[in-house]
Amino acid sequence: MNNSLTAPAALPLTSYRLVQSASPIECGLCGEPNGKNAERCRHCGAPLVLSQQLANPKNAPRILAVIGPPESGKTCWIGLWSDIMARRSGHDVYNTYGAFSVAIQHHVVGCLSRGWFPPATEEDPTTWFWLHGSTHHRKRRLQFVVPDIAGRAVTAAVEASGSQPLVAGLLQLCSAILLTLDGERLAAGDRAPDFWALKALHYLADLSGPQPPAVAKPLALVLTKVDRCEPARDFPDLWLPRLAPATFEYCRRRWKEWGMFCISVAAGAGFQRFGAHVRSFPTRVEPFGLEQPFRWVLDRLR
Amino acid sequence: MIRWLSEYWQEVVARFQVPAGGPVTGEAASDPVAPVEAGETCAFPLAQVRPAWLLAPLRVDQFSSEEREAAWRVIRRTMAYIDVGKVVVRGRDWQADPDSSSQQAVCTEVHVEPFWIDRYLVSNRQFAEFVRDGGYRQPEFWPQQVRDMVYEFIDQSGRPGPRFWEDGTFPAELADHPVVGVSWFEACAYAAWAGKRLPTDVEWLAASRGPASPGAPASGSRPTATAEAWQQLADASAYPWGDLFDPQRANLWETGIGTTVPVDWFPGGDSPAGVRQLVGNVWEWTATAFAQYDHGADFEWTPLWVSLRGGAYDTYFPMQASRWFQSADWPLARRRNVGFRCVWTLPDGGSLDSTIGSPT
Ligand SMILES: Nc1nc2c(ncn2[C@@H]2O[C@H](COP(=O)(O)OP(=O)(O)O)[C@@H](O)[C@H]2O)c(=O)[nH]1
Ligand SMILES: [Mg+2]
């Protein structure tokens, strides 16, 4: 695919290499053909340079699927986590590949530092963020991909599998699942996040084959926005079963490896009106626990 | 509950819009932190622990002149005198486009009466004196409306005290760390017990004003000829030491400590007036409502937020710990990274001389 005679020597973006390939490119996630100049798959929206690597059975980066209902804090978490990792030096260094991997960090940190939460992730997959990075893992480097999947797309996939080829493909291929549960809503007595999680886990269990004794993919249950349910902050094992009992019970019965975590990005949130719509803002940015769930699932990858 | 709190809040805001106290003469600039004077602790414990309370005009005649002088020595050692005239407050323009990177501040010039401010945050050890003195049980320190709730201001073992204490006391190793886990009402009660009050937002800004120009000595003399220009320069600095964040001067996320530190650490972060840790370590409660100097704020609900200043050990963006950022919390919040310091003004326009005899 890569013609070394015509490839410019100093271009760091691997995606440019695809531009030079002669034949149409097949998306590694949905299998559909794309024009040779395409950056993203025109059917499922995945960045083609990534989807091809992901489909390669040898040495493919591991997919860490962050899923949760819309507005449950996924984008803020991934974006700020990648900023924290990018600032780290020494033993635990972290690399990102491709400019597209910096986009989520740029977007989230840009908004937060200006005093606003980022706007909601759109359902259109061509606008999703993809983070392709690597970190130190068992004495070698491990490459991983974290797609920032819109919550609504996962909801749609769960309700009607087949309607969302990209989501189905990603969840089929993924090595670990990080499931966000909105701590603010759960603390307010709203059980909807519990049921959303339960449905998503059923869907994931179905994807992994007919009734195995236990689902093997590591699963992190992540209670987000713990600034809004502060007593839970240091005791996820105590509070998650109380706040999301159905999800907890299901995991206990069906999942092999799973853990519970609490995170927050801000110390509180407010809502400013702009005419008919509102935009939320963090009162101050105080990351809490953002790294642990990722560390935990990475440690469990084989 | 919301209604009475709201009413009470209106009262507080009204009370603090004009800083209390009339013109104060005497002491012009604060001294550097003086060494502890031997003997004064044992001889006059009240002067040591509650000097401002002792010096209140209503009470001061009950004490000997030695005791009053001891109290003044403690004040001069532990507090800085701030007399800056005007302060420029940079508010936030809430109508500005959230997705545009150019953010325009709304500047307001506010006059500030002179005042004294604690050089250090209130420590656990100091707060324990208040607890030991039965501060949580003395109604005079609590507004009528919160008196029923004081029993909810308890520690891990259910005793009155800050949220993260146990058995009515602090972990021994945290004695000199700032007290945290106190609601705004507890901070106000402590201040009242000490004969002081919480600083207004503007007072906090006045105390944290930076040096006139980058590289100027922290306690350099003030060129009177260009007082106006000097003030503008000093007000323009983002941090008490200048314009650029420096993790060696304050305990923020970037400093890498990740928890509170004793109140006398980070001397490099002192403001020119000699006030420590205005930036970093813990957020500071103020006596002012959130967004009071902002423009176009139209929040979906009125949260009765109190302004917090200065950032804490887990503040991720240094800019959010700077003088240009205001955070907020609900007055009942008892956070692990929010503490406070107090200010003192002599009420009723009483001059230093008439109150204490000889201040020097
Ligand atoms: N209080 C609080 N609110 C948060 C936090 N993180 C996110 N939010 C709120 O949740 C909303 C959705 O966050 P986002 O990351 O876009 O969620 P996503 O739709 O799951 O990607 C934000 O606009 C904020 O209002 C947090 O740590 N604390
Ligand atoms: Mg999102």
Image: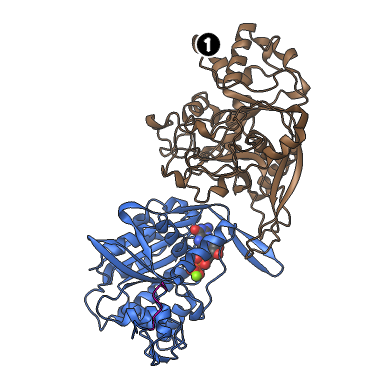
Magenta stretch: helix, strand or loop mostly? loop
Is residue B114 shown above or below A36?
above
Is residue A125 shown above or below B344?
below
The picture's colour for chain B is brown
The residue singled out by tag 1 in the image is B40
Quadrant of the snapshot with the C terminus of chain A: bottom left
Residue B193 shows up from this direction: yes
Residue type of the residue flagged with mark 1: Glu
Tell whether position B101 is magenta: no
Residue B16 shows up from this direction: no
Q: Quadrant of residue A140?
A: bottom left
Q: Which residues are magenta?
A: A6-12
Between B153 and A297, the one nearer to me in the picture? A297
For the point 29% across and 76% down, the residue is A60
Is residue B33 shown above or below B92?
above
Quadrant of the snapshot with the N terminus of chain A: bottom left
Neighbor class of circle 1 (other Cα within 10 Å; few <14, some 14-19, many 20+) is: some
Relative side of B348 to B274, left or right: right
Colouring scheme, one of rainbow, by chain, secondary structure, one colour:
by chain
For the point 76% across and 42% down, the residue is B109
Residue B320 position in % (x across, y down): 57, 49
Is residue A34 shown above or below B94?
below
The residue sitting at the front extreme is A5
Relative side of B360 to B126, left or right: right
Give the SS element for disc 1: helix
For the point 25% across and 64% down, the residue is A300
In blue, which chain? A
